[in-house]
Amino acid sequence: MADDRIFNFNAPATFNDIHDNRDCTIIVPSPTENTQKAASQMASKPVRKSSLPTIPRKKDSRPRELMTFSKRGILDGNLTLLYSQMIEDGWIGKDTKTEDFISLFSGSHSEGTVIWAGKYGKGTLVKLFSCFEAYELIMVPKGFSIPSILMGHFVDEYGNFLTNLDKGDSANEKAGPEMMGFVKILKLNANRAGRRQSLDDDNELGYDDSLNEKDIKSDGLTIHKR
């Protein structure tokens, strides 16, 4: 009867040893030290997660326009009144500095910014300054346009400069009466501009009566005194 010896592949063996150990238990040699080390390194190596490519944020390549409008016969007192009224009516943000707003009419380069509160669409903002120009209250310097100057100075509530003001968006018809009120403020006589008056009292305001007859028609919007 064959003995119960265990056959080891690591030890030398003869044919008789193999023949006599039909019921032997085969011991598979364990991995070498190098194999164990390599397996350990593979197990401990972190798996690199695949990530989506980062899309760079598109920057506005258009340089900021620092030129401003030139005022024509307007006192700083008129502009201060206009500033207060535009804040009260929700056209510009209350955090806009008075000096930044007034500098918009300086006719020179200015770093000042005005916060657009967005009560009406951006097309209404362009229309307002078109009214100022039509009533000869401001002058657009040669080589510039109303949209380009506005885009260089008006920002949204997050501090981003307004864009696409040159797309020709129409003005909101509901803004007509308010725009006319702004025009009236800038047309105040010099001796009235230092005081805040009710815009409904025409005689007290002393504004130019020609305002009654002059209409501005553009983009389907007619602005007139009602």
Image: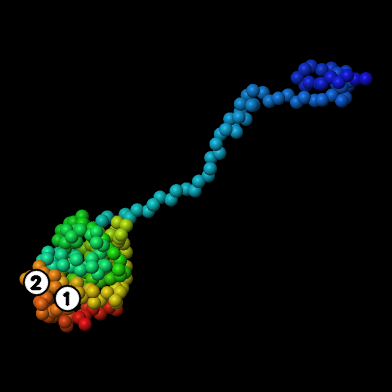
Determine whether the residue tagged by mark 1 lies in a helix, strand or loop: loop
Q: Is residue 134 visible?
A: no
Q: Look at the numbered discs 1 and 2 and tell me whether their residues touch, using CB distance below 8 Å.
A: no
For image coordinates 40% across by 50% down, the residue present is 56
State the image quarter where residue 33 is shown. top right
State the image quarter where residue 22 is shown. top right
Residue 192, label in figure:
2
Q: State whether residue 199 is above or below residue 4.
A: below
For image coordinates 88% across by 19% down, the residue present is 3
Amino acid type of disc 2?
Arg
Q: Position of residue 34 (x, y in %)?
A: 63, 24
For image coordinates 20% across by 74% down, the residue present is 181
Q: State whether residue 179 is above or below residue 53.
A: below
Q: Position of residue 81 (x, y in %)?
A: 16, 67
Nearer to me, 5 or 62: 5
Q: Residues within 10 Å of mark 2 (few under 14, many from 20)?
A: some
Residue 164 placement, left or right of 189: right
Q: Quadrant of the N terminus?
A: top right
Residue 24, label in figure:
none
Residue 199, label in figure:
1
Q: State whether residue 10 is above or below residue 57.
A: above
The CA distance from mark 1 to mark 2 is 12 Å
Amino acid type of disc 1?
Leu
Nearer to me, 30 or 131: 30
Q: Residues within 10 Å of mark 1 (few under 14, many from 20)?
A: some
For image coordinates 21% across by 63% down, the residue present is 144
Q: State whether residue 59 is above or below residue 91.
A: above
Q: Is residue 44 visible?
A: yes
Q: Quadrant of the C terminus?
A: bottom left
Q: Position of residue 147 (x, y in %)?
A: 26, 65
